[in-house]
Amino acid sequence: MAAAATTLTLKEFLALPKQEGLRYELVAGEVVTMGNAGQRHERVKANTAEIFTVYNHSHRLGKVYSETMFQLGEAEGRILDVCLLLKERIPEPAEEGIYQGAPALAVEVVSSESAAELERKVESYLAHGSRAVLVLYPDARTVRVYDPSGASRLLRGDQVLQIEWLPGFSAPVAGFFEGL
């Protein structure tokens, strides 16, 4: 008879010793080692952070974060590539610990996830409060936008990304992939 896998709570996970240079997430109570992203992934992530930072600088809706962990349930802690956390969710002064729930805007740059894992991430972000999830595909140079209704749309090339709850936000899809 096989032994059952031990699952952790996020609190237990955060207390574990971490190996220098490795990144970890907690998914359904299981510790998952994250791969190291390559130059293409990092370029798209940097472009995305820059696009939203420039927008946020003039609108002051919150803060743009990169590589930040969010607690999505008792046994799940996910690190997003880029996100926009609205100011009503940001404690002042900053507190210790990680943010609870998903940010308003969650962004994932596809590099090594399986389709099933990527779908689980999107569903989890939406179930825990994201108003939109962007999935960027560097190889295809496309952006898929998901919303809480379950709808999604695919944008490419010369199309422009607009997010209705971000007043005045507009960005050409090609800008996310500049330099590839």
Image (cartoon, rainbow, N blue to C red):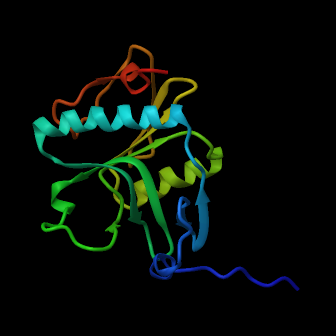
Residue at horizontal 53 percent and vertical 77 percent from the top: 17
Query: Observer-nearest residue: 139 or 168?
Result: 139
Residue placed most toward the observer, 150 or 75: 75
The residue closer to the viewer here, 43 or 79, is: 43
| 136 to 4, vertically: above or below | above
- In the rendered structure, the answer to whether residue 175 lies left or right of residue 121 reads left
Q: Quadrant of residue 46?
A: top left
Instruction: Residue 124: give x, y in percent of width and height.
Output: 47, 58
Q: Position of residue 161 (x, y in %)?
A: 33, 27
Residue at 38% x, 49% y: name it: 148
Vertical comparison of 139 with 59: above or below? above
Q: Is residue 102 above or below residue 13?
A: above
Q: What is the x, y in percent for residue 26?
A: 54, 68
What is the x, y in percent for residue 94?
19, 67
Q: Is residue 39 left or right of residue 73?
A: right
Quadrant location, the N terminus: bottom right
Answer whether residue 31 is visible to the viewer in this image.
Answer: yes
